[in-house]
Structure formats: structure tokens, C-alpha cells
Image: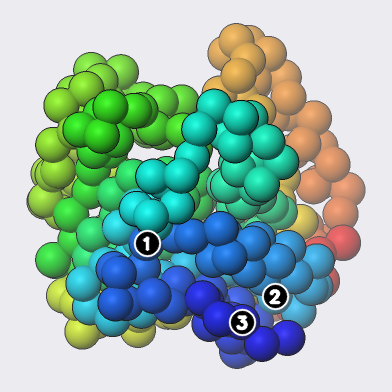
Amino acid sequence: MSYQEIIYEKENGLAIITFNRPEVRNALNYLAIDEALEAASDADADDSVKVLILTGAGDKAFVAGADIEELRARNTLTELGKRSARRRVLANLLETMSKPTIAAINGFAVGTGLELAIACTIRIASENAKFGQPEINLGIMPGNGGTQRLPRLVGEGRAMEMILTGDLIDVQEAYRIGLVNRVVPQAELMPYVKELATKLAAKSPLAIKLAKDAVHAGLNMSLKDGIEYENKLFAILCGSKDKQEGVNAFLEKRRPDFQGR
């Protein structure tokens, strides 16, 4: 399928969604959300895809928030409707799909751009990246998971400061507070992300899926219940063909060939 606002590619077990509106710093309109959701759903359903990467076109921005003209037209009824709900569906899919998702942040990640980035499994940023939830400056607040995912990632105090001041932070501060996993020179961003994605793609898809599930589910459980849930998932993996293949490959000093079973 052809897309207008994104570029969707597959290569060597990786799927890449590029938000392609560089003239507006990849600000998201409804069509970009719809297309990204369709592409992400395809990547999730495609067994040949092991990792999904998100990035932005150009060297200025990952996603610099919502399309301002569409934002001007939003009201209470639009935000309670099905179309706006698709933003949340996209972010939830990026977070909960069985495969790792990596945000390759190549510039501004603000507003809904940051909300999509923090829904991803891992965030890698270039040295020119900047981050923020500036919605408060427009008389609104984050509306796509920012008030929920950000404090879980960086702590309540830091999240409150970012949300209530609307101030942007640079990439070194983002790395210091744990908002991003790595910082790399801009020219090395996509090569580094693809190398990381390829490394993840070589792991057991089943182990990846259940490990992600254990972390996400455990955040909403008591420590005791989380450990019990982890043990159940560990027990499932111990009976899998991938576990047998992994142990055999280790003993035979060869690379494992995981099948996700």
C-alpha cells in the first residue's frame, strides 16, 4: 500500500515507519496517525518482522507534536470520539505488541511525539534531540499517555516538572533522567538503531514477548504478584522449543536458530 504521510519499509526482519512531514517537523495529523497505525498493525501481524523502528524524516525532528491546524479545530466532542482514540490505539500498540519497538529520535520529540517515543520499548536519540510536553503552554495537557507513561519512566517529580512547565530538555538531560537509553551522533543514529534491532531480532521471539509482558504487567502488580507472574512465564519458556534450542546451541558453541515456539 502507498502512504502519503509516512514511509513504511521492511528489510532483514526489521520494519521501519518514518513520519514523513519534514516541512512541519513531522507534526502528526489524523492521516499520519491512521497510516502509522495501519503500518504498525501490519508489522505486528507479520511473523517475518522481528523489530519495529520509528523515526522521523529529515534531521530536525522525530515528531514535533500535533498538527497545529487540526489542534485548533479540536473540541471536547472530537477528543471523546473514535478518530482521536486512534492516537491512543497507536501508542498502546507500540507499547504492548509482542515485538520490540525502537524510537530512533533524530531531533524534536515533543507533545504527542514524546508520547509515542515513550510508548516504545527502547529510545535511542541523536545528539541534537530535544524533548518536552509543552501542551500546558497551549492551555491543555498531554492527551496521549504523557501523564501516565512519563512518570513511570522518569519518576513523578521530573514528569511533573516537564508537564507543568512545558519546558524542553536537551538530550544529555534526557539521558541523565533515563528518558532515553543511548545518545549517538546524528549520522550514526540509524546505523546504530538497525544494529541494535538486528541484535534483538536474533533472540527468541517467544522469550522477547513474554519478557516484555512480565515487565509491563508487573508494573501494575504488587512485587509479590509480579514475581509470581514472572515465574509462570519463565515456566512456560522452560517448556519451549526455543529454550531447548538455546541451551543446545550454547553447549554446541553455535548460534541458536529460534523459531518462536
Q: Residues within 10 Å of mark 1 (few under 14, many from 20)?
A: many
* Camera-nearest label, 2 or 1: 1
**Depth order, front residue of 115/210:** 115
Distance of label 3 from label 2 (alpha carbons): 19 Å
Q: Amino acid at mark 1?
A: Ala
Q: Amino acid at mark 2?
A: Val
Is residue 203 in view? no
In terms of sequence position, does the residue under pointer 3 or pointer 1 come before the other?
Answer: 3
- In the displayed structure, 174 sits above or below 261; it is above
The image quadrant where one finds the N terminus is: bottom right
Q: Amino acid at mark 3?
A: Tyr
* Residue bearing mark 2: 49
Distance of label 3 from label 1 (alpha carbons): 16 Å
Helix, strand or loop under label 2: loop
Colour setup of the view: rainbow
Q: Quadrant of residue 249?
A: bottom right
* Label 3–label 1 contact, CB within 8 A: no
Distance of label 2 from label 1 (alpha carbons): 27 Å
- Find residue 8 and report its horizontal and vertical position in percent: 59, 81
* Residue bearing mark 3: 3
